[in-house]
Image: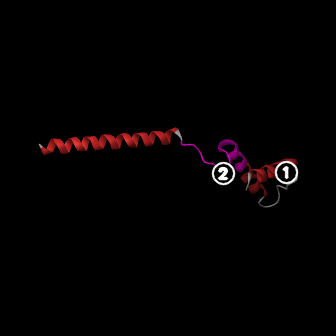
């Protein structure tokens, strides 16, 4: 469902055009509310999101662990070779 369709469904429900007694109407209106809320908070579906600070922290921590690990291992190999 697109945002335009969701907005139209919600608008018709609020105006009383849609009958809430019909089976599936409330489910449709709830889905329309979810689509509009998602678009309001996160932008349209399928839009690329920028990396979060948490993602950046995980990448930096991973690079630091790999760098330190390789430095320690190379030091251990040099120290045991003597």
Mark identifier at residue 54: none
Q: Position of residue 61 (x, y in %)?
A: 40, 40
Confirm whether the magenta stretch covers residue 66: no
Residue at which label 2 appears:
45
Horizontal side of 66 relative to 53 (left or right) equals: left
Q: Is residue 23 above or below residue 56?
A: below
Q: Position of residue 46 (x, y in %)?
A: 64, 52
21 and 28: which is toward the camera: 28
Q: Residue furthest bottom?
A: 23
- Which of marks 2 and 1 precedes in the sequence? 1
Q: Residue at x 65, y 44 (%)?
A: 42
Residue at which label 1 appears:
12
Q: Secondary structure at mark 2?
A: loop
Q: Is residue 46 above or below residue 60?
A: below
Q: Position of residue 35 (x, y in %)?
A: 71, 50
| Quadrant location of the N terminus in the rendered image | bottom right
Q: Position of residue 8 (x, y in %)?
A: 82, 51
């Amino acid at each position: 469902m697109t945002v335009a369709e969701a907005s139209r469904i919600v608008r018709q429900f609020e105006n009383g055009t849609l009958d809430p007694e019909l089976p599936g109407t409330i489910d449709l209106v709830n889905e329309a509310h979810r689509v509009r809320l998602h678009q309001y908070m996160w932008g349209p579906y399928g839009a690329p999101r920028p990396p979060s600070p948490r993602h950046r922290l995980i990448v930096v921590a991973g690079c630091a662990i790999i760098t330190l690990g390789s430095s320690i291992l190379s030091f251990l190999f040099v120290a045991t070779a003597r």
